[in-house]
Image (tube, coloured by chain):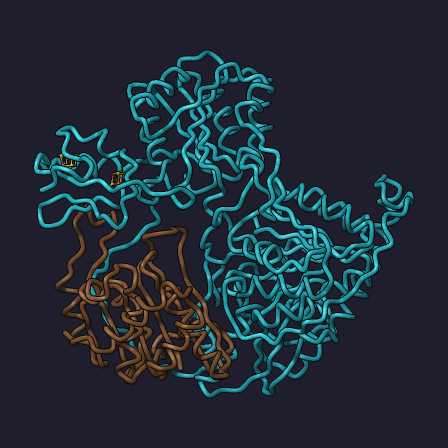
Chain colours: A cyan, B brown
Amino acid sequence: MGNECIALGAIHAGVKCVCGYPGTPSTEILETVVKENPGDIYVEWSVNEKAAVEVAAGASYSGLRTLVTMKQVGLNACSDPVMCLAYIGIKGGMVIVVADDPGPISSQTEQDTRHFAGFSKLPVFDPSTPDEAYEMIKDAYEYSEKYKTPVIFRPTTRICHGYSSVDLKEDVECIKAEGFVKDPKWAIFPKLSYQNHVTLENRIPQIGEDFSSYRFNEVNGTGSAGIASSGIGYAYSKEALESLDAECKFLKVATAYPFPEKLALEFLSGLEKVLVIEELDPVIERELTYICGKYNLKTKIFGKLTGNMPFAGEYSAELVKSAVSSFLNIQQKEETIAVPNLPIRPPVLCAGCPHRASFYAVKQAAKGLEAIFSGDIGCYTLGNAKPLEMVDTCLCMGAGITMAQGLQRANPQTVNFAFVGDSTFFHTGIPGIVNAVYNQTKIVVIILDNSTTAMTGHQPHPGTGVMASGAVAEKIDIAGVLKAIGVKKIIKSNPLELEKAVSSVKEAAEFDGVSAVIFEAPCIAISKPGPHLIITDKCTVCRKCIKELGCPAIVYSDGKVYIDSSLCVGCNLCSQICPSGAISQQEGCR
Amino acid sequence: MNYIITGVGGQGTVLASKLIADTLIERGEKVRSAETIGMAQRGGSVVSHIRTESALSPVVPKGSANVLIGFEPSEAARCMPYLKKNGVAIISINPVKPVTSSLEDNYDLNEILTFLKNAPQKMLMVDGIKLCTEAGSSKVMNVCLLGVAAGSGYLGITLDEMRATLKRRLPPKLLDLNCRALQIGADAPLI
Ligand code: SF4
Ligand code: SF4
């Protein structure tokens, strides 16, 4: 797996400190470091991306090689330290892996980290296969130390979650760290920033020049037409040319910033036209267009800006092939087969997921109230789906709690509920609650505590009492935190006991001030299932259980309702809402 | 060779594709592979791609899969555009209905099966649930289907090779069950 390649590449390059926050598609990098740790690497799941970058920076200042992992939106959460580090620099090589998610497949945005690299003036590496990623990580450390700057390593989903055969080098590089040496250069001040800015700007073209001879940037092929590409787009375009039996000149850009201008000039010379194939933003396309202008070249550059390639969405082999064939004027016979209507499978909460029970309890408690439900990032974002429909807003990590406050100010007649998961609570939720208490904004915070970071595959967090390495940690008590920051009404409740759960929410909603309900029930993936339930003859096929809960284990087929025993985990939620008392444990079945 | 393995999250498609990839690697082939999984941990469509030879991208282009293994008829139908003109599909005919179908009742099994049966490619259809019952576990559909595929001779992997992979990859206590499932698949009657 690409993520494993990145982790192994870093381990073999002698990384000694690894920090990150889980986020698809980056999560398995840090997990692999935990698994393959030779014993001398410090690894942590940090509370958020900002903490991760800063912990790693401290270690880098001391000469250790460090690795930070996150997904693209995580970079937004730590842009403060990342921007500043570009000015201060580092000592031990620092690689910040930021996984981009074209599509997006599981993210809020299709932002392009290569742009962020240019904005923050940090070199960026963009691998096009998992095996290349393995090799490239080592180079990234070398450039980082050569120019004393953090570097960004930007794979996309197809690289992170792609698999390939890789030849591993088993010997680990041994980097001697001299430890932290006190020096005024580590403290940022306006005067120092000015001086460093001058150095920084002088360095950019130098690195660009250096990158022109970088081993994974290359020009090949011949012809008067050219294709410029990066990442997975490179693999798609090469395969498209092969299957179209066509030839053209090729530029592969593994480092979009600082742009390898000299190499690009070599590519552009003699070309009439170029098609740029890159996912997300037109970074290479703008650079090539700029170079054509700067050197007064007549080459025409085609891509997103000219309407030839789409801006949004993930590229596919088919999309690239059809773009390449029309660019090279090759007729392609399209054969499509008519597939019948197929059911869609939208993501849903798992059978027996305690979030379903929590949403249902809040929905019942809020009946008759003018209520707005602000959601957040995690499995519980799926509470927006039918039939629950309990997510009115969702923006970014931790935003539910704070947006609820703005909604409350603008709509004082409404009751504002904010849902937040346990991991998100620690990530960026706490300051938002402090803000509500401090500014006396009435909101009801519903904390969905399932004892794990479920969406990304069950990583521990500060509330679980376990560290990334599996070692026991101090368990941070959510109720205790709430109490300490001045929340006056805190109710703990089990969402699977429906009646009590509903009354807890009602009580919290009636409280004048900031209140919180902590719904405690473990994610089904980390707990033992109970005996599954069955539907007895008493069922009147009213389908209330299906229409109101949407548990995937309850199926309606041939005029009958039944429970799929392979999915049901026996959470008992459905039995509490069936008006006919038709859902029960095994005995008395038909 | 290009393989597509498809089904619904939770059916064991990912393990099936790992077993295929592992067998090919063991034989010394260079393998690339990828999975497309949506946000759902369970219940979503899952497609695994496996490629050998000089493939650069891990994703199988449409119209170029030699073998398609479908764990579920609607997911198999969704992936039919990947199958080569002279490709072979191995499909379990038992449907898994999504929640939306229970809300709206929009899953037309007959239409989907007819479409699959009428496809111009070679279609090997089996009753996956029946095979699992015979093997004695609802969790071995993946290995049963690998058995059908390997036994048919179209997979490019022999039953012996697959058995060796099971031995290498599975915990000893699951080995007997899975070897049985593999053989049951290989002997399975086609529908
Ligand atoms: S008890 Fe009911 S709601 Fe809970 S998992 Fe089983 S079928 Fe679904
Ligand atoms: S709510 Fe009860 S009576 Fe209604 S369909 Fe479900 S099991 Fe049957």
Q: In this view of the protein, which residue sits in the foreground, A502 or A74?
A: A502
Q: In this view of the protein, which residue sits in the foreground, A403 or A475?
A: A475
Q: Residue furthest right?
A: A183
Residue A263 screen position, x and y as percent: 71, 76
Residue A46 screen position, x and y as percent: 63, 43
The answer to whether residue A57 is left or right of residue B109 is right
The quadrant of the rendered image in which ligand 2 is seen is top left
Q: Which residue is located at x 51 percent, y 49 percent?
A: A109
Q: Is residue B145 visible?
A: no
Q: Residue furthest top?
A: A512
Q: Which residue is located at x 12 percent, y 29 percent?
A: A580
Q: Which residue is located at x 57 percent, y 34 percent?
A: A426
The answer to whether residue B149 is left or right of residue A514 is left
B18 in relation to A458, above or below: below
Q: Is residue B47 visible?
A: yes
Q: In this view of the protein, which residue sits in the foreground, A417 or A523?
A: A523
Report the number of discs. Answer: 0
The answer to whether residue B111 is left or right of residue A493 is left
A558 in relation to B178, above or below: above
A2 in relation to A239, above or below: above
Residue A361 screen position, x and y as percent: 32, 27
Q: Quadrant of the C terminus of chain A?
A: top left
Residue B33 screen position, x and y as percent: 46, 71
Q: Which residue is located at x 29 percent, y 73 percent?
A: B182
In which quarter of the view is residue B122 placed? bottom left
In which quarter of the view is residue A187 placed? top right
Q: In this view of the protein, which residue sits in the foreground, A523 or A443?
A: A523
